Image (cartoon, rainbow, N blue to C red):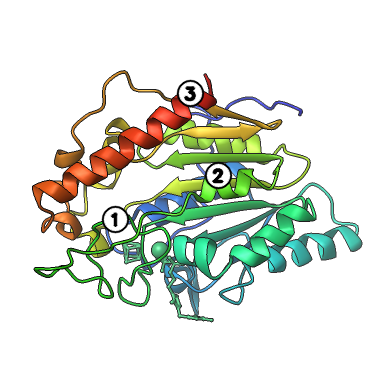
């Protein structure tokens, strides 16, 4: 793989490619889209399905993408961006990037088949999943990436059942199991790491996938200035991890010696306020089992 210079706070472009949108204050997803396009640049074809980022970005006449951008069917992000890339190549267009940007629902549930097919065909596309852990645009319903215990409108917290009873799908590992050319997890709390991964993805000769944790103050019951902090905390307390998959190997980018308190992370969010001690113990136990497995089998950076 050809390696281009890393992008950082000093050399990142001042150009904006996604601005004037209608996202809520402090939206992690909109920051993720903004950063992705800053790294990929103006010659980017962008496809987004139904979800918050298309809802806030395509309000005619205030269209917020300076790049070529369109809304796909909910299920069809990866197939539509594959077609756009193939069409551009057929027209002789060179030096462009093709990116699909979808939410957790649009990726892990409804769009998973199209994504799987695109990876199988080794399409030269970049796929970004911004993960706010629920179907936010339609009013905070549980998705396949909603963590255990989360209160959503379809998994309310009552006396007997306290929020979601299922756990988060391992999308990163599902994608890696396809033998994808490049996959990574990221968080908007660790922006430099995220920028490096987008920069790497744009140089991949094949399919790449980045799964970025993107807090949603409105759906999570958190303050508008908390997204970056939460994006750090979730990694530091081990409930999310920073990793890559390349050349058939997993690489752990951050391997905390000791985890920060998962309880503090959870209790600062309205969506987890109802959790009892036993619920938090289960979440911590699941976390520890997961880390035991990945520490044993993944290469450390
Ligand atoms: C086929 C289809 N089913 C359902 C919807 C309704 N819908 C639009 S956006 C959305 C939520 C998307 O959730 P996610 O992909 O997580 O993105 P977010 O809104 O959280 O950014 C849903 C259910 C739709 N537009 N099309
Ligand atoms: S509901 Fe959440 S994801 Fe949607 S625009 Fe608002 S903060 Fe962003
Ligand atoms: Mg979502």
Identify the residue position indicated by label 1 in the image: 148
Label 3 crowding class (10 Å Cα cut-off): few <14, some 14-19, many 20+?
few
Label 1 crowding class (10 Å Cα cut-off): few <14, some 14-19, many 20+?
some
N-terminal label among 3 and 1: 1
Residue contact at pointers 2 and 1, CB within 8 angstroms: no
Camera-nearest residue between 208 and 39 = 208
Residue in the image at 47% along x and 31% along y: 193
Q: CA distance from mark 2 to mark 1?
A: 18 Å
Label 3: state its secondary structure: helix
Identify the residue position indicated by label 3 in the image: 296
Residue in the image at 26% along x and 27% along y: 259
- How far across and down, in percent of the image, does residue 119 sit? 72, 53
Q: Nearer the viewer, mark 3 or mark 2?
A: 3
Horizontally, is 259 left or right of 38 in the view? left
Q: Nearer the viewer, mark 3 or mark 1?
A: 3
Residue contact at pointers 3 and 2, CB within 8 angstroms: no
Horizontally, is 217 left or right of 210 in the view? left
Q: Quadrant of the N terminus?
A: top right
Identify the residue position indicated by label 2 in the image: 173
Label 1: state its secondary structure: loop
- How far across and down, in percent of the image, does residue 160 sit? 13, 68
81 in relation to 120, above or below: below
N-terminal label among 2 and 1: 1
Answer yes or no: is residue 190 visible. Answer: no
């Amino acid at each position: 793989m050809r390696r281009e210079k890393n992008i950082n706070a000093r050399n990142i472009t001042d150009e904006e490619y996604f601005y004037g949108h209608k996202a809520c204050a402090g939206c992690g997803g909109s920051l993720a889209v903004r950063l992705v396009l800053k790294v990929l640049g103006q010659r980017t074809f962008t496809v987004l399905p139904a979800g918050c980022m298309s809802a806030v970005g395509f309000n005619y006449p205030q269209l917020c993408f300076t790049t070529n951008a369109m809304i796909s069917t909910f299920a069809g992000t990866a197939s539509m961006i594959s077609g756009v890339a193939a069409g551009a190549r057929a027209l002789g267009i060179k030096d462009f990037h093709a990116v699909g940007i979808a939410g957790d629902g649009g990726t892990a549930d409804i769009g998973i088949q199209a994504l799987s097919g695109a990876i199988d065909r080794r399409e030269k596309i970049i796929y970004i999943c911004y993960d706010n852990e629920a179907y936010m645009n339609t009013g905070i319903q549980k998705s396949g990436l909603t963590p255990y215990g989360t209160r959503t409108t379809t998994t309310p917290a009552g006396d007997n059942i306290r929020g979601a009873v299922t756990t988060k799908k391992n999308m990163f590992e599902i994608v890696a199991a396809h033998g994808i050319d490049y996959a990574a997890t990221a968080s908007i709390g660790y922006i430099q790491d995220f920028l490096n991964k987008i920069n790497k993805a744009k140089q991949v000769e094949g399919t790449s996938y980045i799964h970025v944790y993107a807090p949603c103050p409105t759906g999570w019951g958190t303050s508008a200035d908390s997204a970056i902090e939460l994006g750090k905390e979730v990694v530091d307390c081990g409930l999310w991890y920073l990793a890559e998959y390349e050349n058939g190997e997993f690489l752990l980018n951050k391997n905390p010696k000791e985890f920060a308190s998962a309880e503090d992370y959870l209790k600062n969010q309205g969506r987890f306020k109802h959790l009892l001690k036993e619920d938090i113990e289960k979440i911590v136990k699941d976390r520890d089992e997961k880390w035991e497995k990945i520490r044993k089998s993944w290469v450390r950076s």
